[in-house]
Structure formats: C-alpha cells, structure tokens
Image (cartoon, rainbow, N blue to C red):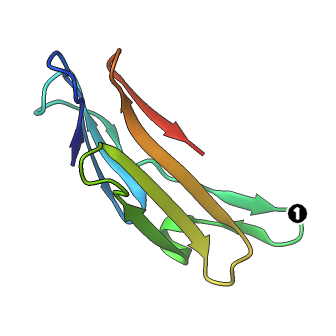
Amino acid sequence: MGSDPSDQGRMVFTGSQGQLDKIFYPRPDRVVNLAQQWLVTAADAGWSEPESEGRQQLLRPDGQALVWSGLSQSAHERWQIRRRVFMDPQRDVLVQRL
C-alpha cells in the first residue's frame, strides 16, 4: 500500500502482481479505480495479457520513499513493460511512468 506523503494527502493506492490494483480517493474507504490491465499486441505475434501470461514483479527500491518499480515480462521474453509509480507531493495525483 502507498499513500500521499504530504500532510494534506488524501490518496491511497495498492498494487499486486506487478500492477496498480486499487486507488482510493478522497478517503481510504472510497475506491475510484480498480485493477489496471494491459494488452500487448504485435503484428506477427497476435496479442497477450501480461497479467495472465507473463511474469510480474513489483518492488519498492527505497523503503523510505513511496515509489514502486514494476516489471511485466512475457514468458518467452518477447516483450516487457517497465513502470515507476509514485505520488506527486504537490497535488492529489498518482503518476505512472512507462
């Protein structure tokens, strides 16, 4: 679980299986987003769902910072999705960089 580090922060989020799972805003009991999912496509290989067909990893590289690093990778290493997830300390915004 992660939360906004500011004193005024009202956002909380969770993650599982390498993905953002739930985002709660403006209170911890109000879910505003459920389970982001990805679809990977390629002209020569059809499509793939990373959540069910790939390997997922979600890490907190620094135990003192609310930053998550995620990696989703196909079983045959044909594709991978890398992401960083963090809270913007100035606004009620969750940022996900791919």
89 vs 13, nearest the viewer = 89
Q: Name the residue carrying label 1.
A: 43
Residue at the extreme bottom of the image, as rendered: 76
Label 1 secondary element: loop
* Figure label count: 1
- What is the crowding at mark 1: few (fewer than 14 residues within 10 Å), some, or many (at least 20)? few
66 vs 81, nearest the viewer = 66
6 vs 48, nearest the viewer = 6
Indicate the position of residue 65 as horizontal and vertical percent values: 29, 44
Q: Is residue 11 left or right of residue 75?
A: left
Q: Residue at x 32, y 53 (%)?
A: 62
Indicate the position of residue 1 as horizontal and vertical percent values: 21, 49
Indicate the position of residue 60 as horizontal and vertical percent values: 34, 57
On screen, residue 73 above or below 83: below
Indicate the position of residue 64 as horizontal and vertical percent values: 24, 47
Q: Quadrant of residue 46?
A: bottom right
Q: Residue at x 74, y 75 (%)?
A: 78
Residue at the extreme left of the image, as rendered: 29
What residue type is disc 1 on?
Ala
Residue at the extreme right of the image, as rendered: 44
Q: Residue at x 23, y 28 (%)?
A: 11
On screen, residue 6 above or below 32: above
82 vs 44, nearest the viewer = 82
Q: Residue at x 24, y 29 (%)?
A: 4
Q: Is residue 37 left or right of residue 1?
A: right
Q: Is residue 47 left or right of residue 58?
A: right
On screen, residue 72 above or below 76: above
